[in-house]
Image (cartoon, grey):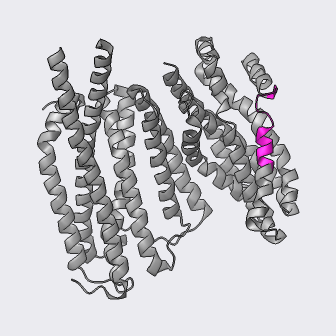
Amino acid sequence: MASIWSYANPKKFIDTTDRVLPVLSVLALAALVGGLVWGFFFTPDDYKQGSTVKIIYLHVPAALMAINAWMMMLVASVVWIIRRHHVSALAARAAAPVGAMMTVIALATGAIWGQPMWGTWWEWDPRLTSFLILFLFYLGYMALWSAIEDDDTAADLTGILCLVGSVFALLSRYAVNFWNQGLHQGASLSLDKEENVADVFYYPLLLCIAGFVLLFVALVFLRTQTEIRARRMRALLARERLND
Amino acid sequence: MPELGKYASEVLASYAVSIALLAVLVAVSVARARRLRRDLAQVEERMKRNG
Amino acid sequence: MRALLIRDLRLAVRAGGGFGLGLAFFLIVVVLIPFAVGPQSALLARIAAGVLWIGALLACLLSLDRLFALDWDDGSLDLLATAPLPMEAIVSIKALAHWLTTALPLVVIAPVLAVLLNLPAAGYWPLVLSLLLGTPALSVIGTFGAALTVGLKRGGLLMSLLVLPLYVPTLIFGAEAARRGAEGMAYGTPLIFLAGITCGTIALLPFASAAVLRVNLR
């Protein structure tokens, strides 16, 4: 069994992910379609929320992935800062737009759901507000990546920004809680089974979450490959200019 | 089609918005991956020819 | 260290150093607010604390890009980096100089501007206290943002995008303390949180700023 660090070799990473990606994409598609179809067509309406309960199959997985994507970027940034593997930095870069998109989906579905249920598109509720702040962090992170030309400098700076940003995102979460008590319901999923949503909604939801996770992994693999190639191309073009 | 009751527009809108956004994300990622794969192959080919 | 601090202060106060620009900006923001929301004094009294906090925060932000830019342009930042001072000390001094020249005048002038916005009498102490406790955090966080974008040509806009989300916790607790004070409620709790954030950022963030600056000077 090779060490996990052997995948830090860009060529090895591309070769391996090339083999894994088709399988992963098919699995992601199957889980997503399966979960959403199950949730959309074959679950009953909630007695309080009516059919809007079906939005949960998009909202909760997207929200989960919005946070998990940032976590993954944090881990990748730490790996880059400590072990200086380029693939790790590029993976963090590749994940950011995916995470930002997940945040948008969570906010959009939440707003659409909030309109009939709370009577408002937007409410300055702690959870909603923290997600908006998280989105701002994604924007800043991506803007910093695209603003700096030198790859290693950009990787270092965004890595440190990710670490500092994580601390401040957490602080904001608690500050926002202090600032306003919310309308948002408690966790839909937790290890404590008592608090969970009912079983009829639970199993399709799990399938949807699996679909979102697989989709995220597949997208990050694909986008990391792209970033590796883009980096290699910049290096080649620079060498070509040097030779002329 | 399941009976969505009075909230049909909300449910359908959120599914439409989310699926559209995911589709855009996937399409952009795939398109950029294809383009770079091709461009890099070209550049590598040129480098090999010119030494 | 003291020499560096004195040099930075002198540079800032000297003509063209931008001293006073922040104050003027603060004044203008506060004057513009009633034009935007209407002249009702009851409404202004309600939002005064928040407006003053936002104004102070933006005035701080505006002066941040000068923090390293001049030293970067004339190369004295490279000299400083080779000086027998740790980089952490340099960024801390820079943040201190920024606080003394930009934030402290804002704190002093805030009660005067509060008169314009009809802040209730009970709100003056909480406002000044919260600004006094909160602005050091704004300077230190801003130094981090300025260090991140120091080498970039048009870094100003990017820096706002990076720094403003980091300001959120400070703003929430600071403005909350000022608002509660203005409404005659107890404001101790947000003030303590604010002090905690300020102490935490002063203690830890210079390490991040120094690391970032080292990368940029590489």
- Let me know if residue A231 is in the magenta part: no
In the rendered image, residue C200, in percent from the top left (x then y), is placed at 61, 40
Tell me where the magenta segment starts and ends, as one range: C13-27
- Viewed as shown, does residue C43 lie left or right of B28? right
Dividing the picture into quadrants, the one containing residue A40 is bottom left
In the rendered image, residue A191, in percent from the top left (x then y), is placed at 33, 62
- Viewed as shown, does residue B51 lie left or right of C48? left
Q: From the viewer's side, name the closer residue of C63 and A127.
A: C63
Dividing the picture into quadrants, the one containing residue A244 is top left
Q: Residue at x 77, y 33 (%)?
A: C100
**Image quarter in which the C terminus of chain B is found:** top left
Q: Residue at x 46, y 75 (%)?
A: A114
Q: From the viewer's side, name the closer residue of A6 and B44.
A: B44
Can residue B18 be seen in the rendering of this structure?
yes
Dividing the picture into quadrants, the one containing residue A227 is top left
Can residue A187 be seen in the rendering of this structure?
no
Q: Residue at x 72, y 32 (%)?
A: C98
Q: From the viewer's side, name the closer residue of C14 and A244.
A: A244
* Vertical relation: A91 (above or below) A211: above
Counting the numbered discs, the total is 0
> As drawn, which residue projects farthest toward the front?
A244
Q: From the viewer's side, name the closer residue of A153 and C5.
A: A153
- Let me know if residue C16 is in the magenta part: yes
In the rendered image, residue B50, in percent from the top left (x then y), is placed at 18, 16
In the rendered image, residue B1, in percent from the top left (x then y), is placed at 21, 83
* Vertical relation: C9 (above or below) B23: above
